[in-house]
Amino acid sequence: MFGVNSTFADSSTSVPGPRDPDRRFRPGAGFASGDRRASQPPAAPAICPNRVAHWAYGEGLRAGETVALLVRDLGQAEAMRLGLARLGIRVVALDGGRRGEALADSLALAGATLAIVDTALAETYAGVMGRMASYPSVWWNGPGADFASLDLALAEQG
């Protein structure tokens, strides 16, 4: 794999400068300083696919039904999809960038019986109102939901 004539590493090249073993412990020296971690937004709480499956079964969702996801965090969306797929539920991911009539058309074509919507996308989802003949029931994902909060329902299962 890495033989004598390998182009991967040439032993004749020298490493520039001495190595500082205490670099990661000094303030202001890269990732260990905490500067980058403090500037990043807090990560969303992890969602367990197994809890999503139990929640969906308790809500009466069964194989062959469709759930629409309007969720920003791809990690959360994938965990929800995995949990719902365990029950044989079809999952349709809606594009949060679409608005009004385009989002209403996507939701109508999906034929969803339930929609899981991020609370941050509530205004986007409100643009669908008045554009469809019937609406799926809605569960809200994220902080700020007063009712039908998926976060609270999943936390109760723990």
Image (cartoon, rainbow, N blue to C red):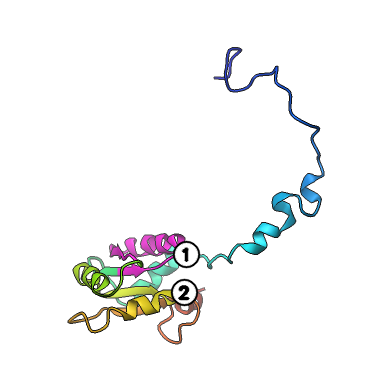
Is the N terminus in the top left, top right, bottom left or bottom right quadrant? top right
In magenta stretch: residue 75: yes
Query: Above or below — where is 146 with respect to 29?
Result: below
Q: Residue furthest bottom?
A: 146
How packed mark 2 is, by other alpha carbons closer than 10 Å (few <14, some 14-19, many 20 or more), is: some
Q: Residue 151 location, x and y as percent?
A: 47, 75
Pointers 1 and 2 in contact (C-beta within 8 Å): yes
31 to the left or right of 110: right
How packed mark 1 is, by other alpha carbons closer than 10 Å (few <14, some 14-19, many 20 or more), is: some
Residue beneath the point at 80% across and 50% down: 25
**Circle 2: residue type:** Leu
Query: Above or below — where is 17 with respect to 37?
Result: above
Q: Which element is circle 1 on?
A: loop
- What residue is pinned by disc 2? 154
In-front residue for pair 51/115: 115
- What residue is pinned by disc 1? 48
In-front residue for pair 71/60: 71
